[in-house]
Image: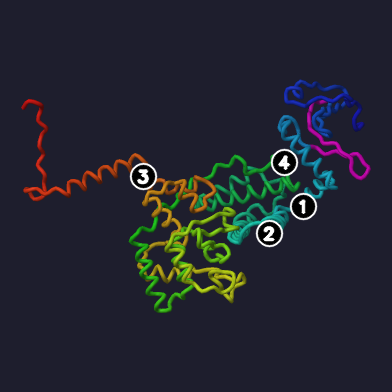
Amino acid sequence: MREATKTLKQGMKLTKQRIEALKPASDRQTFYDEALPGLAVRITPSGHKAFYFFYRFGGSSKKICLGSFPKTTVELARLKARDFAADVTKGKDPAQERQSAKEAKSLTEIVDLFLTEHVRPKLKPKSIALYEGSIKKHILPVLGKKKIEEVTHRDIATLHHNLRAVSYMANRVAAILSKFFSWCEKNGYRDRGSNPVIGLEKYKEEKKVDFLGAEQLAALGSALSILEKSGAIPALPAAALRLLMLSGMRSMEVLSLKWDYLDFETGTASLPDSKTGFKVVPLSMPALDILKSLTIYGDYVFPSATSRTGHIEGIRKHWEVLKAQAGLIGRWRIHDLRHAFASMMINSGASLPIVGKILGHSQPATTARYAHLEKSPAQMVADAAAKKIAEGWKTHQTNNNGIIPFQPRQAAGE
């Protein structure tokens, strides 16, 4: 069969309605989009319609299929065509790159590229460990031998279902796979709009809502003083633990703190690379007093001569010792000190938006876990009024063991 026996010379703006109205002929027809050079829809005599991107590369005319209509929409076809046009401008041959991508032997090979080109250079160490561990333990054993184009929504749903006993991990694996397949699409390893994770319904996760209370925090403070005096916990880790209790900062934000980040005049710490990007943390007077008491040795507030980073990298073992000394029962984490600080702020009258700003939450939903602790403005006003009335009662002395007899109000004239 000839490549194309009939091509309309005039252009037309491709729309869903116009493409649906096109009728097949005895020859294959190609209709070019007048809005985007190179984009076209081709109709075979059998009535099959598909989008193509036509371009020139290395002196030759080439084309690449963008997908069949109507499964591939006009909008998606335009998006793909723009991406390929940008590649051509950069000196890349989309057809050749697609062919090379499809020659990949298995998902395992592409995952290795994903880890090398995206995860390790761009994510933080904790996220890298999560990606690598989840991929090695849960993803590769199930999907590793499949070709990248062969992975379906059913494959993902089955893997997600098999991990349902640990809902948190099931959802994290799904999120990692979604990111992976989006990366595959951007890099030509799968067609645009083919992410097999889309539409997966995640499991409801039971989030921990218990917080360390004032009594427990007091026990931790007392225990820390005892352990520091005895030498069981050195001075620098002890100061870091105190700062965690008094600032609401994340553990690594405290341990990687530099003196340059601190402004003692404004009482703030400017963190250039926190989990949510740049943020300014307001520091309380007790927190500033701890920082002022430390001796400056180099750039870091909590330096370490033996670590690869130049600062203390972990205080988990000190935290376990501290919990035992304070008599804390349960699987409390260092991160729970951050939650405790948030709950104390809310119990002191702070609103959820203010707490979210201090903690550096990028999403309001993250702060919403503390909503059950927050009193409404109406309740706070009612509490204040009732307290004033109750305090007024206390100022009165009666002859009935402190009880003021109720006196009905007499009507006028009685």
Q: Of the residues tagged 3 and 1, which is closer to the observer?
A: 3
Quarter of the rendering containing residue 35: top right
Secondary structure beneath dot 3 equals loop
Q: Is residue 397 left or right of residue 251?
A: left
Q: Residues within 10 Å of mark 4 (few under 14, many from 20)?
A: many
Tag 2, which secondary structure? helix
C-alpha distance separating marks 4 and 1:
17 Å
**Mark nearer the N terminus (2 vs 1):** 1
Look at the image and say whether residue 64 sits in the magenta stretch.
Answer: yes
Asked if residue 111 is positioned above or below residue 297 in the image, the reply reads above
Q: Which residues are magenta?
A: 45-65
Is 334 placed above or below 227 here?
above
Q: Earlier in the sequence, mark 3 or mark 1?
A: 1
Residue where numbered disc 3 is placed? 375
Q: Amino acid at mark 3?
A: Lys
Q: Magenta stretch containing residue 165, yes or no?
A: no
Whether residue 404 is situated above or below residue 24 in the rendered picture: below
Which tag, 4 or 2, sits closer to the chain's start?
2
Quick one: label 2 or label 3, which is nearer the N terminus? 2
> Which x, y percent locates residue 88?
84, 44
